[in-house]
Image (cartoon, rainbow, N blue to C red):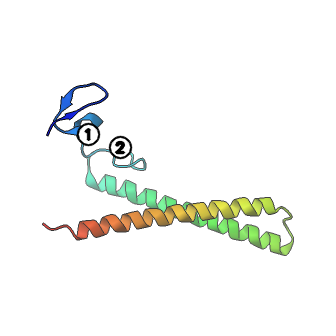
Amino acid sequence: MQYVDTRTGTTVSNPIERLNVRPGKEVSRFVKERGSDTEDMFSSIFNAALDNINTTNKYLSDAENEEIKLAMGKATSTHDLAIALQKASTALQYTVTIKNSFLEAYRQIINMQI
């Protein structure tokens, strides 16, 4: 099947050719281009996931600390508490979404027939 590249008007047999993506290179915005070694790619993705979890834990801890300060009367600004709670909520939702995407990809790989 032939496809027409709407940008250049040329006919291509594979629309992926237009993307100018080199196979085996960067697979997400979190992966730094460190070479084509699979272990380096896996360690980059794994370290990015750990950083994401650590950041989420930090935001959750900050929100809990703000709640404690307000309850003890050390803080009078509810604005700081609202900001901390919103950061924690957003970070947690993002982390859960990433986890769910990872598990879905894992399930698809496991269910592949060889």
The disc placed on residue 54 is none
Q: Which residue is mark 2?
A: 33
Q: Is residue 20 visible?
A: no
Q: Which residue is mark 1?
A: 22
Q: Position of residue 69 (x, y in %)?
A: 80, 70
Q: Is residue 109 left or right of residue 75?
A: left
Q: CA distance from mark 2 to mark 1?
A: 12 Å
Q: Quadrant of the C terminus?
A: bottom left
Q: Is residue 5 left or right of residue 32?
A: left
Name the element at disc 1.
loop
Looking at the image, is mark 2 or mark 1 nearer the viewer? Answer: 1
Is 46 or 5 nearer to us in this picture? 5
| Count of marks placed on residues | 2
Q: In the picture shown, does residue 32 fall above or below 68? A: above
Q: In the picture shown, does residue 41 fall above or below 10? A: below
Is 109 or 66 nearer to us in this picture? 109
Q: Residues within 10 Å of mark 2 (few under 14, many from 20)?
A: some
Name the element at disc 2.
loop
> Which amino acid, mark 2?
Glu
